[in-house]
Structures are given as C-alpha cells and as structure tokens.
Amino acid sequence: MSKTSLFAPTTLGPLSLRNAIVMAPMTRSRAVEANTPNALMAEYYRQRAGAGLIITEGTSPSPNGTGYPRIPGLWSPQQVEGWKKVTDAVHAKGGRIFVQLMHTGRVGHPLNLPAGAEVLAPSAVAAEGQMYTDAKGLQPHPVPRAMTDAEVRHAIQEHVQAARNAMAAGFDGVELHGANGYLLEQFLSPQTNQRTDAWGGSVEKRQAFVLEVAQAVAAAIGGERVGIRLSPYGVNAGMKPYPEIDETYTALVKRLAATGIQYLHLVDHSAMGAPKVPDELKRSLRQAWPRTFIVAGGFDRATAEDALREGRGDLVAFGRPFLANPDLVTRLERGLALNAPDFATFYTPGPEGYTDYPAAAAP
C-alpha cells in the first residue's frame, strides 16, 4: 500500500501506529463512581484498539472542570488506577492511546460537580440553554464565576498535574481540548472572554491561556507526547463565530507550533450542522503546522483516503462510526456495512449501546 493508505503503518512523533485511523474523543458518561474509570470502560476501549490511535473521551483535570454527569477525571490516585486498567487493555491489543484533557469551564452545573467544586470560566457569561443533571434532569446553565488571575494560573497547573498523572496511568500522551466550547476555547472567544487583564482584551491576550497550558504540559511530559484539538467555527456549547476568528486561529496555530507539541487535531463540525471551516483557513493552518496534522469531521473511507492523498492531513479521525463499530478498521478495510449508532444510549450508564455492539469479525 502507498504511504497515503489509511491502513498502512505510520508514525506519530516517536510512536509507531498500526494505521492512520484515529478514534476521536467522544463523551460516554460511564464513570459512575467518583468520576473514576472502571472495568466497563476498559472493555469499551479494548474493543476499539484496532485504531492506530485512540483519543479518550474528555477527561477533567480538575473537579471544577467536571461539568457533565459521570465523566472521568484525572486528578486523584483512584482515577489514575482506574485509567491503568484502560491503558493496559489497549496496549495488550497493540493499540496506542492518548487521554483528552477537557476542563468544561462554564459548560456545567453544580449538581454535576464533586463536593466543593464550582463552575468557573474566563468571564461571568452563562452558556445558552440547559445542562442535564442526574439529580434534577435538565437545568439552566448557571452564570459561572469569573476566574481570578490566581485561579487561571492554578488551572494551568491542574493541566500539568493531570498530564503527569496520565503518564503514571500508562497513556502514550495527552490531547488538550481546545475545541467544542470548553475552557480553552472560552479563553479564545471575545464572546466568552471579556477580561481586560493579561488573559483577555485582545486577540493576542485571549490566546495566552491556551499557549501557557500547551507550553507547561509540553515541559512536563515532552512535547512529542502532547496534541491539541481545535474547532474554529464550532457552535457547541453556545459558541458562535466572531469577526476575528480566522486571525485568531492563524496566529494561535503558528504560536502553538513553537511550543513543540506533536499534533494539531482540527475538527470541522459542518457535518453536524455547524458552519463549515473555510477551506482557505484549513489550508493555512495545515501549512503553518510542522508536525502531525489530524483532520476530523464526517469522514468515510473514500473521503479519508482523499484527505491523505491530497496532503490535507496525516491522520484521519472518526467519531460516531467507532461508537457502534468496535471493529471499524476491519469494516472500512473490507468494505463491510456499518452498525448504526443508538443515539438513546450515547450517555447512559451501563453496557447497552456501549460494549454490546457486534463485531463483523473477531477483533
């Protein structure tokens, strides 16, 4: 096969990957006890270890960042031990796995947070709509408390400690979640960041938090083990495009490249109804990035192979197809039909719609 084949071995910095297919990060809400990974989660990821790289569901580096029900964390010794079950299971199948560090910022509710935690954000601007809670169902998003300078700096260190914990748990690396309207992206947008201090007030200052996190995490565990996900033009969690969005991301990616982190994971959510990321912006970000470039957003085998052949990406991430098809790589390679995902069980506790999807062939 050619070097642009989805199914040929490839590399990610110092890591060898069995193929160029990435399992995208997707919230599954199965960490039912103390936001701690469990045996069911280990089985879910084990089943999907045929991917060249798995990126886990969003995992909070902080009690304050645990905005959704039952999402996992990576701040406690118990969580590290829980994640070891996952990484051991994936590595035993020959897979590679990064953990996505996701601080939800304003996208949360006190009923979903551990005791003593609170909903914090760059500015006191509530997200639109409602948040699901196990305790009381749908509740309006609260107005977050604006972080102090000290709390911003503490959040950076929480990412650093979570990255160190990830290494202790056996992960191959970490992905910083700078997409989908969570804390890192909240600092980038003038709609959610209305600060006038060192962390806001201009395009450059709004980038500072993301850059500081990337630099600090790279220094802690090595840039070759760090990636970041970005979603310009995304509308998740109440985000909206803004006039200086292209300027923001073009400058940010150039500055991120200088931190030495390994990959940029660019997601275009237009397949799910968001505005399309302009092709010109995609090209400029690709040209500005000197290392591994991952593309995501509504790909199938044919369009993924086109992206590799045309040099638009080095790896291609697949999301929902991996939920319902634990053997997605085999199905894509053999041209087999895909299972349809059951939307009703995306975020429900238990194995249904999680580990019970049938494989077309023995994994």
Image (cartoon, rainbow, N blue to C red):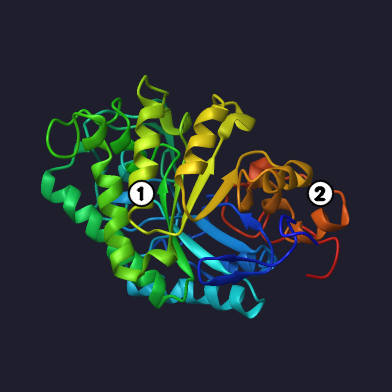
* Residue labelled with disc 1: 256
Q: In which quarter of the image is the C terminus?
A: bottom right
Tell me the residue at 69%/67% (across/down).
9
Q: Quadrant of the N terminus?
A: bottom right
Tell me the residue at 26%/55% (across/down).
115
Q: Measure the C-alpha gap from mark 1 to mark 2.
A: 37 Å
- For disc 1, the neighbor class at 10 Å (few under 14, some 14 to 19, many from 20) is many
Q: Up-down: is 238 above or below 330?
A: above
Residue 15 drawn at (x, y percent): 55, 71
Specify the amino acid type for callout 2: Leu
Specify the amino acid type for callout 1: Leu
Camera-nearest residue between 184 and 15: 15
Camera-nearest residue between 21 and 8: 8
Tell me the residue at 31%/62% (across/down).
217
* Labels 1 and 2 touching (C-beta < 8 A): no
Helix or strand or loop: what does disc 2 sit on? Answer: loop
Helix or strand or loop: what does disc 1 sit on? Answer: helix
Camera-nearest residue between 42 and 251: 251
Q: Residue 291 vs residue 182: left or right? A: right
Q: Residue 126 vs residue 28: left or right? A: left
Q: Which of marks 1 and 2 is in front?
A: 1
Residue 333 drawn at (x, y percent): 82, 57
* Residue labelled with disc 2: 338
Residue 127 drawn at (x, y percent): 35, 29
Tell me the residue at 41%/45% (across/down).
135
Camera-nearest residue between 139 and 200: 200
